[in-house]
Amino acid sequence: MTDDALRLAIIGCGAVAKRHLLALAELRDRGLGGIAVTALCDTRDAAARGLAREAEARLGARPVIYTDHRELLRRGAIDAVDICLPHGLHHGTAIAWLETGVHVLCEKPLGITIRAGRRMAEVADRTGRVLATAVPYRRLIGQRTARWILRESGLIGAPLTFFHQYTRAPRSQPAGPAVPSAPTWRRERLMSGGGPVMDSGFHYCDSIRYLLGDVEKVYAELREVGAGSPRTLAETREDTAFVTLTFKNGVVGMWSWSMAAPGAPLGNVVFYGSEGSLHDTSQPGPSIFHLFWRNPGSGLIESGEVTRRDGTTRALEDLERLYLDRLGEEERETLFPRGTMDGFAIEIWDFAEAIRGRRAKPEVDGWEGLQALAICEAAYESAYTGEAVRVDAILSGERRAYQQRIDEHWDLG
Ligand SMILES: NC(=O)c1ccc[n+]([C@@H]2O[C@H](COP(=O)([O-])OP(=O)(O)OC[C@H]3O[C@@H](n4cnc5c(N)ncnc54)[C@H](O)[C@@H]3O)[C@@H](O)[C@H]2O)c1
């Protein structure tokens, strides 16, 4: 396949699809061409039209619009699709396209359950098509450097524990005229698969595994407290989480957060090793879901600090430079093509390069995406059953009390 032959269709033209367009423009601006958005699909015609206008403005060509992806599928002439749909629609859509020989980049979480995600990965293997899970955050310089600090540099010795905490008050509805309501699918478990642990939490689960290795077991208490009295996962969707993660290498840590904590906000993301700590000091507070991250559009870099046992400190900014200097030219070009630091652009480029056969597979393929999903599902299973849950038992399907009703709904039972 030649560089300029990749015809991409974006399916689902909501919030994240707009971000993908910006990433495609970033690639084009850096001379990383060869990806043309030739079609857009959304059941909401207005959403597709709006994105088509933006695509024309940013990329110079207006994609053809569809309101039913099956019609697009029948027409052919697409090499790859970028699935930006609600979670329950990921597996059916991805599998339909993989089966017709089209490569798939699928937004996180890979599938709505382990069965859904596993089928996607299996079909990709059988058809020989590329399946990539869209996770931009591990590709950012802050997380790449944090991994180097934790796993290779020796700066904080052997990683042992972490404390990741965040709270904020519930967001109130803005005063004034009614605003259009946010998409409701996130509140429906059969379409979302879960709340923030599954949604932005998928990023955290991918990153924490990227930073520290495979998780052995999970114990979680998930609650909704925003309504004024605690409700459990059996009744509702979490706005508050206490998740203990025990890793196969013995590291243990706590991921805890609440989006319904009136009063004093709290933000603390720190890793401890035998010789010191690595602290995310981003202001106004670290992101509990997207570690060592600041909005790439803001031009600001991540902020963090290593503190050694003897009290000496190193700024993450300096360590990022050191990390970059240590990379060979080829690796640097693979991780940050033409110097881009935009995780979304890098994930799309990685996908395109895998399709072109220039790398064996995308960094986060279906199987890798399934691993992060299994950590999310282990947290739900634990909160649902009140027991600690082994991630391997989630991956094998041995434990799926929480997922069962969702699987049945999508005919995956
Ligand atoms: N990587 C990130 O940082 C990030 C950020 C936000 C969302 N996401 C992920 O992106 C995906 C979409 O999230 P979003 O926030 O853009 O949601 P959204 O609700 O803004 O957009 C989803 C779009 O899909 C459309 N749609 C629904 N059913 C459809 C169908 N059958 N065919 C075609 N279109 C259909 C909707 O009309 C809507 O425009 C989710 O998987 C989400 O988790 C990722």
Image (cartoon, rainbow, N blue to C red):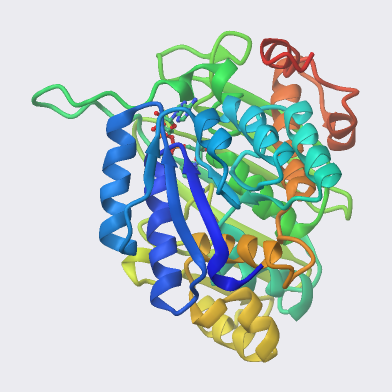
Front in this rendered view, residue 296 or 124? 124
At x 87%, y 52%, the residue is 250
- Quarter-of-image position of residue 404: top right
At x 70%, y 34%, the residue is 95
How many tags in the picture? 0
- Residue 292 in percent (x, y) is at 52, 63
- Residue 103 in percent (x, y) is at 66, 50
- Residue 203 in percent (x, y) is at 59, 47
Q: Quadrant of the N terminus?
A: bottom right
At x 50%, y 47%, the residue is 9
Residue 412, visible in the rendered structure: yes
Q: On the picture, is 265 further left or further right than 219?
A: left
Residue 265, visible in the rendered structure: no
Q: Quadrant of the C terminus?
A: top right
Front in this rendered view, residue 283 or 9? 9
- Residue 164 in percent (x, y) is at 59, 49
- Quarter-of-image position of residue 201: top right
What is the residue that sits farthest to the left in this orientation? 176
Q: On the picture, is 87 further left or further right than 211?
A: left
